[in-house]
């Protein structure tokens, strides 16, 4: 296979990995609420929803391992706890959200059934597929992504050429940082850490790509192509939402807005088709999350089939419990967990990307601990305890933007590296 063709195939695989159907509901409302500052919101959103996840893939290319390898330099115990925490969040929030999106976009408009019934049937089917693995999901996935992309390109194109370039007022006080925080809700950085290894394994299975540098070069090229595709889709959906500022009521939900935009641009038939496609794509995502979680627990318990079964059951029960709630509620519930775990995930990704001489175990430990400590105020603010830490936040740079961990983490990274260089030089001189 030629380098160009191999790059394009890998880029599409990467794009499909991050392009979760549940993520589609986020950019339109973000644009709808951002007004003329849509471009600033889009930039922030794409930093956390596109750039950081792609760094996660580059980290996987270096590590050639699993999620457990991301935090090993901090300590094996930390890495194990972090891994379990990530999987626990995955089955508790993004997996149930796929059921909620499916209900609101594809089931309720057609059948008017209750969200609880949808959630039960949805996760019964998820359990059946998890326990009886089939290639049919991979085949469906490969067909669904191109179909959804085509419809989205039509929606974006029709909007750009049919609507006047007028924008409403923004509701965001801090558009850039609000865009970054909304990007957390895609769970794409977590997705990169959890399932990015799939791409590495696929490349390793190809005999014509032998050396480490060839693999790294391929992933780098494919990564930038996939990132460009994600950026164009996300930015396109954000500006589409911004141009629709007068077409819908202010309090519209994320799913209703996406359906409404599709209806206005493509008509009823295409809107129905998009809803069904999104529902199917959500289902494949849920099966992937539950299967990946069960596989990890099975591996940690010495390939125990019973551990796999119990994990699958717990995952699907959690899915039923959380999946019956509306999408907005699940997103609101997810925020506190994301405000704590996402900064740690971002830091682990970046530390695994920088040159190894700048990422010793001491650097890992110091930066991760600092990030955890300075994420606490943001976490407390997200659960309504912000008033108790107002005085503390005034001393933390960028804390008012809910990213107070960034500068402390960077300062500690530089300081520990300088200390290590100084100690090394003094030992060498002796």
Image (tube, helix red, strand yellow):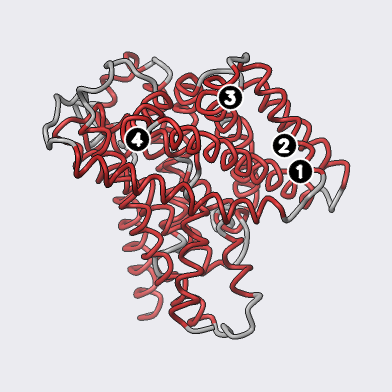
Q: Secondary structure at mark 3?
A: helix
If the image is split into quadrants, where does the C terminus sit? bottom left
Which dot, 4 or 2, sits closer to the camera?
A: 2
Determine the CA span between mark 2 and mark 1.
6 Å
Q: Secondary structure at mark 1?
A: helix
The answer to whether 163 appears left or right of 271 in the picture is left
Residue at 57%, 24% (x, y): give it. Answer: 103
Mark 4 and mark 1: span between their CA atoms? 32 Å
Can residue 367 be seen at all in this image of the molecule?
A: no
Q: How far is mark 4 from mark 2, CA to CA?
A: 30 Å
10 Å crowding of disc 4: few (<14), some (14-19), many (20+): many
Label 1 near label 2: C-beta < 8 Å? yes
- Closest to the observer: 56 or 408? 56
Question: Which of the two discs, 4 and 1, sits closer to the camera?
Answer: 1
**Element under label 4?**
helix
Labels 1 and 3: the sequence-earlier one? 3
Which of labels 3 and 2 is toward the front?
Answer: 3
Regarding residue 187, the answer to whether it shows in the image is yes
CB-based contact (under 8 Å), mark 4 and mark 3: no
Mark carried by residue 126: 2
- In the picture, residue 114 is in which quadrant? top right
Question: Residue beneath label 4, please?
Answer: 181
Q: Which residue is mark 3?
A: 107
Q: Which residue is mark 1?
A: 130
- Quarter holding the N terminus is bottom right
Height in image: 51 above or below 336?
below
Q: Nearer the viewer, mark 1 or mark 3?
A: 3
Residue 274: x %, y % from top left: 48, 38
- Residue shown at 74%/44% (left/top)? 294
């Amino acid at each position: 296979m030629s380098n160009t063709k191999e790059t394009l195939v890998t880029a599409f695989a990467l794009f499909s990995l991050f392009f979760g159907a549940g993520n589609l509901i986020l950019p339109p409302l973000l644009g709808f609420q951002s007004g003329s500052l849509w471009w600033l919101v889009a930039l922030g959103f794409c930093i956390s929803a596109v750039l950081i996840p792609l760094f996660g893939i580059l980290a996987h290319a270096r590590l050639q391992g699993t999620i457990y390898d991301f935090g090993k330099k901090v300590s094996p115990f930390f890495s194990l706890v972090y891994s379990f925490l990530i999987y626990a969040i995955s089955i508790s929030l993004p997996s149930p959200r796929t059921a909620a999106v499916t209900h609101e976009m594809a089931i309720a408009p057609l059948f008017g059934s209750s969200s609880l019934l949808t959630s039960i049937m949805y996760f019964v089917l998820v359990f059946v597929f998890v326990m009886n693995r089939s290639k049919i999901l991979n085949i469906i996935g490969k067909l669904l992504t191109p179909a959804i992309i085509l419809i989205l390109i039509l929606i974006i194109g029709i909007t750009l050429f049919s609507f006047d370039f007028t924008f409403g007022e923004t509701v965001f006080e801090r558009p850039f940082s609000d865009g970054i925080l909304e990007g957390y809700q895609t769970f794409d950085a977590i997705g990169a850490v959890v399932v990015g290894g799939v791409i590495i394994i696929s490349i390793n299975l190809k005999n014509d790509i032998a050396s480490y540098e060839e693999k790294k070069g391929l992933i780098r090229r494919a990564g930038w192509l996939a990132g460009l595709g994600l950026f164009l889709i996300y930015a396109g959906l954000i500006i589409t939402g911004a141009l629709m500022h007068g077409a819908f009521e202010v309090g519209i939900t994320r799913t209703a807005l996406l359906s409404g935009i599709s209806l206005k641009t493509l008509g009823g038939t295409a809107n129905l088709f998009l809803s069904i496609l999104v529902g199917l794509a959500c289902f494949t995502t849920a099966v992937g999350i539950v299967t990946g979680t069960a596989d990890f627990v099975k591996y940690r318990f010495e390939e125990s089939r019973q551990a796999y079964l119990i994990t699958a059951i717990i995952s699907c029960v959690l899915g039923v419990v959380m999946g019956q709630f509306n999408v907005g509620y699940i997103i609101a519930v997810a925020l506190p967990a994301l405000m704590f775990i996402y900064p740690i995930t971002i830091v682990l990704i970046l530390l695994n990307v920088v040159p190894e001489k700048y990422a010793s175990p001491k650097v890992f430990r110091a930066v991760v601990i600092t990030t955890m400590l300075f994420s606490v105020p943001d976490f407390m603010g997200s659960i309504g305890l912000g008033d108790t830490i107002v005085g503390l936040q005034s001393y933390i740079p960028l804390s008012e933007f809910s990213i107070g961990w960034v500068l402390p983490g960077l300062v500690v990274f530089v300081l520990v590296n300088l200390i290590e260089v100084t100690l090394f030089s003094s030992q060498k001189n002796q």
